[in-house]
Amino acid sequence: MFANPDTIVVMRAAEIADLVAKTVESTALRIEAARAAEVPPQRVWHTQKEAADYMRCSVKTVQNLVKAGRLKPNRGAGDPLYHITDLDAVVRMKKN
């Protein structure tokens, strides 16, 4: 729009308002796209169902891994939770 920096451009108030609105909208869309592209932080502890989903297996398989001693849950105050490093180790063992 402004090819030559030495050019003086006269704009009406409505044109300025329209230009500002378009700039704000464009900036908001870029910010929204950048936020959508951000990877959310990965959780460290997972429930039994989440562990099964993470390892792409059934809940029964998770239970069998626990019974076999290949996966150790953290049995704190509530339901058993599984640490992501333990889940990754089981997945690596299954690939070998």
Image (cartoon, rainbow, N blue to C red):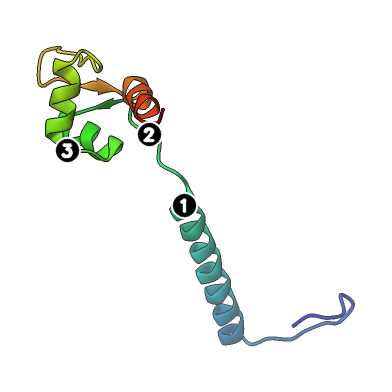
Which circle's residue, 1 or 3, is located before the other in the chain?
1
Q: Rate crowding at label 1 as few (under 14), some (14 to 19) or many (20 or more) other CA atoms within 10 Å.
A: few
Q: Where is residue 33 in the image (x, y as percent from the top left)?
A: 49, 60
Q: Do the residues labelled 1 and 3 touch (CB within 8 Å)?
A: no
The image quadrant of residue 41 is top left
- Tell me the number on the disc at residue 58: 3
Farthest residue in the right direction? 6
Kindly identify which numbered label has been placed on residue 35.
1
Indicate which disc, 2 or 3, sits on the residue closer to the N terminus: 2
Marks 2 and 3, Cα distance to the nearest angstrom? 21 Å
Give the CA distance from mark 1 to mark 3: 33 Å
What's the mark number on residue 42? 2
Secondary element under disc 2, as helix, strand or loop, is loop
- Of 48 and 90, nearer the camera is 90
For the residues labelled 2 and 1, the Cα–Cα distance comes to: 16 Å
Q: Where is residue 89 in the image (x, y as percent from the top left)?
A: 37, 22
Question: Residue 93 lies in what quarter of the image?
Answer: top left
Q: Nearer the viewer, mark 1 or mark 3?
A: 3
In the figure, 68 relative to 92: above or below? Answer: above
Q: Position of residue 12 (x, y in %)?
A: 63, 87
**Residue drawn at x 55%, y 69% as measured from the top left:** 26
Residue 59, position in %: x, y? Answer: 14, 34
In the shown orientation, is residue 57 left or right of residue 33?
left
Picture quarter containing residue 71?
Answer: top left
Q: What residue type is labelled 1?
A: Arg
Task: Tell whether 30 sits left or right of 58.
Answer: right
Q: Which amino acid does label 2 sit on?
A: Gln
